[in-house]
Image (tube, grey):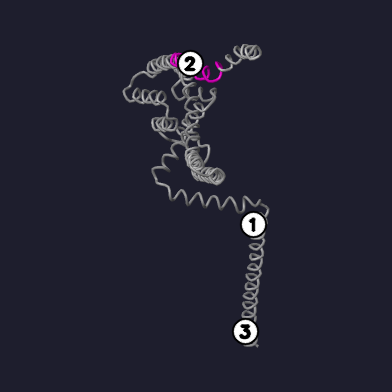
Amino acid sequence: MIIFVIVILIFATFASATVAMMGKRNVSAMETRIQSFRDHAVERDDVDDILELSFGARVLRPAVEGLAHGATGLLPQSVLADIQRQLMMAGHPMKLNTFVTFWLVSIAAFTLIGVMMLFSLGGIQGLGLFLLLLVVGYVFPRQWLKGKVKAKQKLVIKALPDNLDLITTCVEAGLGLDAALSRVAERGEGPLALELQRMLRDVAMGKLRREAMEEMADRVGVEELTTFITSIIQAEQLGVAIAQVLRVQSDQLRTARRQRAEKAAHEAPIKMIFPLVLLIFPSFLAVILAPAAIRISQAL
């Protein structure tokens, strides 16, 4: 009887272990199938999302990005570094690959127009126009980027004296330099205020103020701002009072602004000569001499 019970217990043990292993195997197989269905559903969702995109986003954009990446690899590193620096100084209007794409599209478009002009006109005139359009297509993106940089620098130069006066007033009133810069960045407008906000964020994230201000000077590329930052850094290193340095820099910037205004006023008459000679004087001559010419022609 005891032997029979032992046999039954052993059989039950093996049977339960077998059932458990089979159940585990079935569960793992079921989980595997469920996971495969989930992966398939995710893949279908990805395919559906891709198919919902436009033709340009699915085909043209990757092709253009690949072409721009290849062209970026072919350009010299010095040219790419110069373009990247100008993009940084312009406020990052686009990425490097996007600008290279814009450059290629400009060259291709002007070259196509030049070829059309060459076949339509022919001869030396068509060849000259083709070469001219080719040069324009090559130079136009770089000149556009330089124009963006100069426009930003003009805004910074225009806003710098007033903002420096405000910084000087805040420091003389008892605020620290960081608090004064923060006050000007909050109340100011334009690229100078944005650069100050970025510099203060870098300082808040743990970067040294000297390094953050030097990077701001490199991003802007304005001589007056670079001189101001250099003076602040030297004053901190030598232990000179910041308020005194700010007062001197503020006076110098106001003097420089007055000198620029006087220079522009002196250049105005010279710049007015060309529109006067080419546009205004011919109109005056036509208005004054036309009645006399008509009467002379009638009398004769």
Q: Residues within 10 Å of mark 3 (few under 14, many from 20)?
A: few
User: Element under label 3?
Assistant: helix
In the rendered image, the quadrant that contains the C terminus is top right
- Residue 81 is a magenta residue: no
- Give left or right: position of 47 versus 166: right
**114 or 246: nearer the viewer:** 114
Q: Residues within 10 Å of mark 1 (few under 14, many from 20)?
A: few
Residue 195 shows up from this direction: yes
Which residue is denoted by mark 3 in the rendering?
6
User: Element under label 1?
Assistant: helix
User: Element under label 2?
Assistant: helix
In the rendered image, the quadrant that contains the N terminus is bottom right
Q: Position of residue 2 (x, y in %)?
A: 63, 86
Of mark 2 and mark 1, the one earlier in the sequence is 1
Task: Single out the residue that lies furthest toward the front.
Answer: 300
Labelled disc at residue 58: none
**168 or 104: nearer the viewer:** 104
- Start-end of magenta stretch: 261-281
Q: Position of residue 58 (x, y in %)?
A: 62, 53
Labelled disc at residue 46: 1
Residue 101 shows up from this direction: no
* 198 over 8 or under it: above or below: above
Magenta span main SS: helix
Inter-mark Cα distance, 2 to 1: 63 Å
Labelled disc at residue 268: 2
Kind of residue indicated by mark 2: Ala
Kind of residue indicated by mark 3: Ile
Of mark 1 and mark 3, the one earlier in the sequence is 3
Q: Residue drawn 35% across and 24% down?
A: 236
Q: Residue drawn 50% across and 40% down?
A: 125
